[in-house]
Image: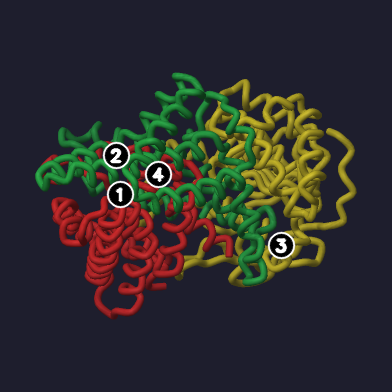
């Protein structure tokens, strides 16, 4: 499946995932304790330069990942202009931008396999509570495997719908899609049982 | 045909039956299967797939007994891994993992190998079949026929003594059918094959014909398939659906 | 055991698919994202524990970097953005929805509607509004003003969750684990 890892290789790709996650946690906490507008703006510029230093393609990819934030910038802008507190609005907006940008940076430079490996290591102590890390690994693999399969089937159902209806597909299609998920779950459980179970 | 694997585990059914939600799917099956190549034929809904699942131990009989080498396959799953493998009709119902390597390694890890050993065996298996480049590939990149072959490899990786096949040729184009047929014919394992195609049973030792969940005929390929083909042709001439009751 | 894991995993995949399938529309033709409907169904169909775990698995995979949220969003950035409360509230919403279905004796469709309403709307919006208030530095009432427009759509989805759960209970009674 498609992941959000950037195809543009950067030096950050070679930093271990655990280190990046720890750094992200530390920086995020630090960021939210910053109260000076100028320091937050400096952080924004610094982050933008960091993205750009990894190449224009990488920076463009990063900018695209920030796009869902724009309605919130709009709301913040209107709100604080109306109240006449533009500095406060800028502080909140810039802080949000840096926080999301930093987090995205980790996502963009870490392969899914490495992330999963970190999770499995972190989940290892849970084995004592009866939660086998291997079961978690199988569950993750199943979601990655069956999301595209289910997606395909949902699209086929949508086509079958449109082949016999002038109306757009509506919510009633969710029932057969859910049914397929249930049936697939039964079959996969059988396939796992056929090879020794969990 | 290659020399058969030493196979001490005969498949025995004693008055075995299976019912679900008050509906009887299989009943009164008493069989002892010791041959190398066994075919299962019958109409749609005759209980062939349920029969295979019963033998594989994926479901337990609701009446009677099923035993493989003296062990009930549904209760001792670990022991069954080395004895029975099953190839489902639809590869998408069988492939559990997103990449070829993970899919093949899963069964081996289930048999107690560690990660390094499992990876080594997967590489050896792929290399043996000339498919080394498949290992990192996502399973979605494979064609239908290739996914079918991957399922067979996943079964073969676990080296079971007997392989159960549920219409492995359905939905495959003719060259892919021929290729898969050749791969199967080469296997030293005992095969139990469900099929709608009497031609696929050439060279088989025994054929079992199921109808309405019961044994209709059982014996060498020639006479059983001849009677089956004739009956099917007669039914097809009448009206295939008149005997379907809802 | 296998069944628990496959049901949880397949329903996590179902949430993703319902968020990515673009062509679902309401009777009026207004396109909606069915993702929160998927979250409700996890609870009402699989029950509190399995449903909550299915959604937790989904949210975990989003954090690991899979673009499974509606609109193809995903990654750690989601957890710093104003909608963080909704994402974190998803598993709790499914858990509560499942709990309501398990604990009431009402007919399955009605119980599922009630569960989806309490879990998928009330609890989810409590989390969502709180998250938005924190990230945007606004008061709770101000933040609720921002998301108020989405509530009617989610009320309709709760009704859909009721109908769909009822339908599944009729077709696959043994698979509706919240009442098994």
Q: Disc 2 on helix, strand or loop?
A: helix
Q: Position of residue C84 (x, y in %)?
A: 35, 52
Left/right placement of residue B14 relative to residue B44 reads: right
Left/right placement of residue B146 relative to residue B158 reads: left
Q: CA distance from mark 4 to mark 2?
A: 12 Å
Q: Colour of chain A?
A: green
Disc 1: which residue: C82
**Do marks 4 and 2 share a chain?**
yes
Badge 2: residue crowd in 10 Å (few <14, some 14–19, many ≥20): some
Q: CA distance from mark 3 to mark 4?
A: 50 Å
Would you say the residues marked 2 and 1 are in contact, meaning their CB atoms lie under 8 Å apart?
A: yes
Disc 4: which residue: A99
**Do marks 2 and 1 share a chain?**
no
Disc 3: which residue: B77
Q: Position of residue C38 (x, y in %)?
A: 33, 53
Q: Colour of chain C?
A: red
């Amino acid at each position: 499946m498609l992941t959000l890892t950037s195809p543009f290789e950067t030096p950050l790709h070679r930093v271990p995932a655990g280190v990046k996650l720890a750094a992200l946690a530390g920086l995020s906490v630090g960021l939210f304790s910053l109260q000076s507008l100028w320091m937050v703006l400096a952080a924004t510029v610094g982050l933008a330069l960091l993205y750009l230093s990894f190449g224009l393609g990488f920076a463009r990819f990063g900018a695209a990942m920030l796009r869902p934030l724009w309605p919130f910038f709009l709301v913040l802008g209107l709100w604080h202009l109306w109240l006449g507190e533009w500095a406060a609005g800028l502080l909140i907006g810039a802080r949000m931008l840096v926080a999301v940008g930093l987090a995205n940076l980790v996502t963009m430079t870490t392969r899914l396999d490495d992330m999963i490996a970190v999770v499995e290591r972190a989940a290892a102590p849970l084995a004592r509570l009866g939660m086998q890390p291997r079961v978690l690994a199988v569950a993750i693999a199943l979601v990655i495997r069956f999301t595209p399969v289910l997606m395909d089937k949902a699209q086929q159902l949508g086509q079958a719908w449109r082949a016999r209806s002038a109306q757009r597909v509506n919510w009633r299609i969710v029932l057969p899609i859910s049914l397929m998920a249930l049936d697939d779950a039964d079959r996969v459980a059988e396939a796992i049982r056929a090879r020794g179970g969990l | 045909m290659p020399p058969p694997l030493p196979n001490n585990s005969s498949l025995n059914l004693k008055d075995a039956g299976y019912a679900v939600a008050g509906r009887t799917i299989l009943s009164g099956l008493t069989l002892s299967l010791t041959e190398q190549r066994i075919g299962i034929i019958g109409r749609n809904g005759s209980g062939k797939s349920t029969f295979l699942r019963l033998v594989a131990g994926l479901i337990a009989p609701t009446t009677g007994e099923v035993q493989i080498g003296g062990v009930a396959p549904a209760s001792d799953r670990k022991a069954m891994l080395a004895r029975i493998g099953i190839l489902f009709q639809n590869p998408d119902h069988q492939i559990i993992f997103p990449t070829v390597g993970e899919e093949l390694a899963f069964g081996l890890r289930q048999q107690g190998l560690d990660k390094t050993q499992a990876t080594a065996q997967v590489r050896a298996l792929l290399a043996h079949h000339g498919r080394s480049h498949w290992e990192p590939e996502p399973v979605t990149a494979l064609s239908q026929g290739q996914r079918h072959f991957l399922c067979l490899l996943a079964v073969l990786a676990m080296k079971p003594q007997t392989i159960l096949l549920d219409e492995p040729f359905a939905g495959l184009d003719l060259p892919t059918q021929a290729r898969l047929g050749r791969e199967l014919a080469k296997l030293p394992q005992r095969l139990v094959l469900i099929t709608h195609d009497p031609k696929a049973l050439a060279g088989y030792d025994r054929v079992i014909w199921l109808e309405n969940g019961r044994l209709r005929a059982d014996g060498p390929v020639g006479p059983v398939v001849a009677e089956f083909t004739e009956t099917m042709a007669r039914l097809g001439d009448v009206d295939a659906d008149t005997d379907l009751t809802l | 055991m296998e069944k628990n894991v496959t049901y949880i995993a397949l329903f996590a995949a179902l949430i993703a698919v319902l968020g990515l399938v673009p062509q679902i529309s309401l009777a009026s033709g207004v396109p909606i994202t069915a993702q929160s409907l998927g979250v409700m169904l996890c609870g009402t169909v699989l029950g509190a524990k399995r449903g909550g775990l299915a959604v937790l698995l989904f949210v975990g995979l989003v954090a690991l970097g899979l673009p499974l949220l509606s609109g193809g969003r995903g990654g750690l950035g989601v957890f710093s953005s104003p909608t963080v409360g909704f994402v974190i509230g998803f598993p709790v919403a499914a858990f509560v929805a499942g709990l309501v279905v398990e604990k009431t004796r009402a007919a399955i469709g009605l119980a599922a509607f009630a569960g989806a309403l309490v879990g998928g709307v009330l609890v989810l919006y409590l989390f969502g509004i709180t998250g938005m208030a924190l990230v945007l530095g606004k008061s709770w009432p101000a933040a609720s003003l921002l998301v108020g427009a989405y509530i009617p759509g989610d009320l309709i989805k709760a009704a859909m969750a009721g109908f769909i759960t009822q339908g599944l209970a009729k077709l696959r009674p043994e698979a509706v684990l919240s009442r098994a």
